[in-house]
Image (tube, rainbow, N blue to C red):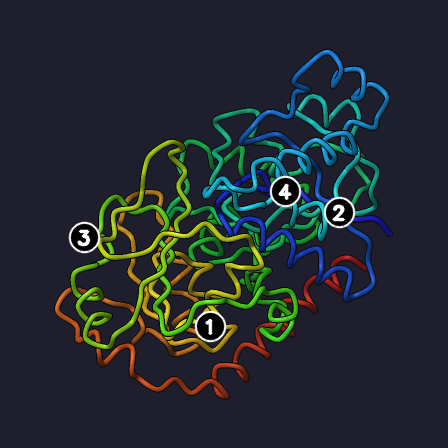
């Protein structure tokens, strides 16, 4: 049985994005299924760049041409400090559709062959249906008899725009099974007449020991690791307080970021050494850190999986917010104490002992429920 997955996959700096796709594929492999990610060019169009590439594309070997091209580019640009080698991870560890698609219409006319389509995880349902092209993320293509499953997509909003509820209901009606990543998603579906279950983000379906096997060991010791996403300044992560803690405890600071605004310098943490690791190095940096400071959901997730002391700084609340997925998970694991707010004692949060055995037992139960959801609905 083949399973085609629609998700985000093109980032060159968002570790959570690439790891959630990898984890879902690995989980499907573990339960006995072959899967591939459908190369839909949402963030960045997949057009061939030259006449030669158009010829390769027509011969259906473009993907392999691009593997060689990107490998050579990585080799000759290896001294570029910003190169995180995401393509190397993708090509080595993940499976892809041979064909690439730039528009919904291309998927409708010539859909990838699969018995099951899965949409998710990530914030794929944050792409509002006011844009017709976003029907891709609601699997609005393929044969009628193809099974359609939503696995842990996020709406990334507390309320879906009321003007779009009718079209949302229409698209959800084609699904054989619906799951989401947050409580707010369950409510959005319920409000328009659909039952959805809450499941784990795919990265949590695998054990920390699995990720350690692919991690690259850090060569640095005695450091705090900071991974910040979608913040605008050091004040958003209360850097002065944590910088003081690090200096008091003689900790170096290694930092990296994921930045949706390409070309903007986000190295604003005074005293931190910025580093741009590969996916394997990023996991290794978390694993070897004295503690992790993050504004990222997946920065928090991997701290939990690797049993690492961590502190989370929530983002400024807007209509589109990623905080619910953070607070939902921490609430389930009884780890809300790891959220920092101005005035809290940094020393107390970092040194607060976490009962990892209890956390793991809770995660095991949630993991079993989520994997069973996949198994039962694929069958």
Badge number at residue 288: 1
Q: CA distance from mark 2 to mark 1?
A: 29 Å
Q: CA distance from mark 2 to mark 4?
A: 12 Å
- Please give the residue where the numbered disc 2 appears in the rendered image: 95
Q: Secondary structure at mark 4?
A: helix
Q: Secondary structure at mark 1?
A: helix
In the rendered view, does 202 fall on the left or right side of 236? right
Where 65 falls versus 208 (above or below)? above
Q: Secondary structure at mark 2?
A: loop
Q: Nearer the viewer, mark 2 or mark 1?
A: 1
Residue 115 in the image, given as x and y percentages of width and height: 83, 46
Q: Secondary structure at mark 3?
A: helix
- Please give the residue where the numbered disc 4 appears in the rendered image: 87
Q: CA distance from mark 4 to mark 1?
A: 24 Å
Q: CA distance from mark 2 to mark 3?
A: 40 Å
Residue 224 in the image, given as x and y percentages of width and height: 34, 68
Sequence-first tag of 3 and 1? 3
Residue at x-position 80% and y-position 25%: 110
Badge number at residue 235: 3
Where 92 falls versus 328 (above or below)? above
């Amino acid at each position: 049985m083949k399973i085609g997955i629609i998700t985000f996959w093109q980032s060159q700096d968002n570790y959570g994005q690439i790891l959630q796709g990898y984890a879902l594929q690995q989980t499907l492999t573990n339960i006995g299924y072959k899967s591939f990610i459908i190369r839909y060019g949402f963030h960045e169009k997949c057009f061939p760049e030259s006449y030669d590439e158009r010829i390769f594309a027509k011969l259906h070997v473009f993907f392999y041409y691009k593997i060689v091209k990107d490998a050579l580019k990585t080799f000759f640009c290896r001294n570029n400090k910003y190169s995180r080698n995401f393509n190397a991870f993708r090509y080595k560890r993940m499976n892809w559709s041979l064909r690439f698609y730039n528009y919904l219409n291309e998927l409708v006319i010539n859909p990838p062959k699969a018995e099951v389509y899965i949409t998710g995880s990530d914030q794929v349902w944050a792409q509002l249906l006011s844009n017709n092209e976003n029907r891709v993320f609601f699997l609005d293509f393929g044969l009628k008899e193809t099974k359609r499953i939503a696995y842990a997509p996020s709406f990334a909003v507390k309320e879906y725009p009321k003007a779009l509820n009718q079209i949302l209901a229409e698209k959800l009606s084609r699904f054989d099974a619906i799951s989401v990543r947050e409580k707010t998603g369950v409510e959005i579906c319920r409000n328009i007449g659909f039952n959805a279950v809450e499941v784990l983000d795919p990265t949590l379906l695998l054990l920390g020991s699995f990720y350690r096997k692919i991690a690259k060991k850090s060569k640095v010791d005695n450091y705090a690791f900071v991974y910040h996403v979608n913040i605008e300044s050091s004040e958003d992560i209360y850097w002065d307080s944590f910088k003081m803690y690090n200096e008091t405890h003689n900790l170096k600071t290694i930092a990296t970021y994921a930045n949706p605004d390409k070309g903007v310098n986000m190295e604003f943490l005074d005293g931190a050494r910025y580093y741009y690791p590969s996916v394997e190095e990023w996991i290794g940096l978390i694993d070897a850190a004295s503690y992790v400071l993050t504004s990222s959901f997946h920065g928090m997730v991997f701290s939990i999986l690797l049993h690492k002391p961590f502190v989370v700084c929530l983002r400024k609340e807007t209509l589109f917010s990623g905080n619910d997925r953070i607070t939902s998970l921490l609430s389930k694991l009884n780890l809300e104490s790891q959220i920092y707010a101005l005035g809290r004692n940094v020393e107390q949060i970092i040194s607060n002992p976490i009962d990892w055995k209890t956390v793991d037992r809770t995660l095991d139960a949630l993991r079993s429920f989520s994997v069973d959801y996949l198994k039962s609905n694929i069958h």
